[in-house]
Image: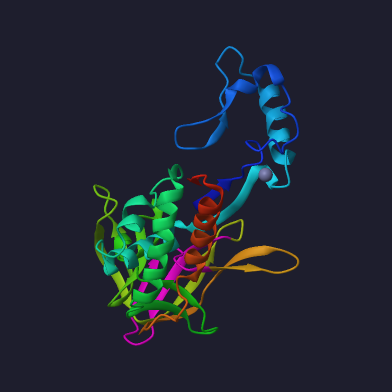
């Protein structure tokens, strides 16, 4: 789950596309007020067959796949929230367009003029971002960063649903907290806290899935047993991809590495530039 964006090309307007598949219905293919071209059939004409044919045409109508000059994954939601927090830290005075115009749902538009402002502010962001100090959860055996503290989620990175617990990290370390049933945003009682710990699967179910997990703080030797498995790593090999429980972890406070936000800055710049070049809006989806 995350945010994507694309920008349509101008080939249709410039007469560079293959002929529209049903000329008698072509007037239903038109530009909305936001500048986005869409095929909107009235209900009595609507049919799956027409849609499929339209879809095939749109995919191959011009040199741009799907009639889009740019199509980018912007970020997953966690990365997106981390970026938004960095925007707020720099502040509205410097980054008003990014703060107000970036969407919070998978739909919306940014006009070419907005894209011009966004490009300027993305440069401002690069100059001003104070990468700051943050708290990270590290796989002790491999050194991989597993998660970082995200304020807007109260540090929670794993929602345990029916187990009744959530897990997260904050400035004081890793924690397991009871779910607050009245307010899912709030954090319940903390039942385990540690800066250096092991996550031991002590019982599997009939499908080999972890059923009971013991958390063991290696400094204080406190333990907590639950059916919540908080931290797994997704491992892809040639044969299969699987989610593997992480065994030994610790919490570290450090400076995030430079280039931290490149994952989102780069695709945002690509779609904003495409909007400026084509004069068409960025479509968030
Ligand atoms: Zn095109």
**Quick check: can you spot residue 159?**
no
Q: Position of residue 150 (x, y in %)?
A: 34, 66
The type of colouring in the image is: rainbow
Numbered marks: total: 0
Front residue (pair 264, 277) = 277
Q: Position of residue 113 (x, y in %)?
A: 42, 50
Front residue (pair 95, 204) = 95
Residue located at (40% from left, 51% from top): 114
Residue 263, above or below 43: below
Q: Position of residue 104 (x, y in %)?
A: 38, 49
Residue 54, above or below 127: above
Q: Quadrant of residue 47?
A: top right
Residue located at (52% from left, 74% from top): 246
Q: Quadrant of residue 132?
A: bottom left
Q: Which residues are magenta?
A: 209-232
**Residue 177 horizontal side relative to residue 53, left or right:** left
Front residue (pair 84, 282) = 282
**Quick check: can you spot residue 205?**
yes
Check the image and name the residue furthest to the bottom: 219
Q: Position of residue 66 (x, y in %)?
A: 67, 43
Front residue (pair 19, 230) = 19
Residue located at (65% from left, 36% from top): 12
Residue located at (75% from left, 29% from top): 19
**Residue 248 horizontal side relative to residue 10, left or right:** left
* Ligand 1 image-quadrant field: top right
Residue 229 part of the magenta-drawn span: yes
Check the image and name the residue furthest to the top: 44
């Amino acid at each position: 789950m995350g945010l994507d964006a694309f920008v349509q090309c101008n080939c249709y307007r410039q007469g560079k596309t293959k002929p529209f598949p049903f000329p008698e219905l072509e007037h239903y293919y038109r530009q909305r007020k936001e500048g986005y071209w869409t095929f909107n059939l009235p209900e009595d004409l609507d049919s799956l067959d027409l849609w499929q044919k339209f879809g095939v045409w749109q995919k191959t109508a011009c040199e741009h796949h799907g009639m889009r000059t740019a199509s980018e994954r912007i970020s997953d939601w966690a990365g997106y929230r981390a970026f938004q927090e960095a925007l707020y830290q720099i502040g509205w005075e410097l980054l008003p367009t990014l703060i107000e115009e970036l969407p919070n749902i998978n739909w919306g538009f940014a006009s070419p003029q907005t894209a011009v402002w966004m490009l300027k502010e993305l440069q401002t962001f690069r100059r001003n971002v104070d990468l700051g100090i943050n708290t990270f959860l590290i796989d002790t055996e491999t050194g991989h960063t597993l998660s970082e503290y995200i304020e807007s989620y109260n540090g929670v990175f794993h929602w345990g649903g029916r187990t009744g617990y959530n897990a997260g990290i904050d400035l004081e370390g890793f924690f397991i907290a009871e779910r607050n049933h009245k307010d899912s945003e709030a954090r319940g009682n903390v039942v385990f806290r540690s800066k250096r710990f092991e996550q031991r699967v002590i019982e599997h179910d009939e499908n080999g899935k972890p059923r009971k997990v013991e958390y063991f703080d290696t400094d204080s030797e406190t333990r907590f047993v639950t059916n919540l498995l908080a931290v797994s790593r997704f491992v892809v090999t040639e044969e299969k991809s699987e989610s593997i429980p992480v065994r030994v972890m610790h919490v570290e406070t450090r400076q995030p590495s430079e280039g931290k936000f490149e994952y989102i800055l780069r695709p945002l710049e690509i779609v904003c530039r495409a909007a400026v070049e084509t004069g068409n809006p960025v479509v968030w989806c």
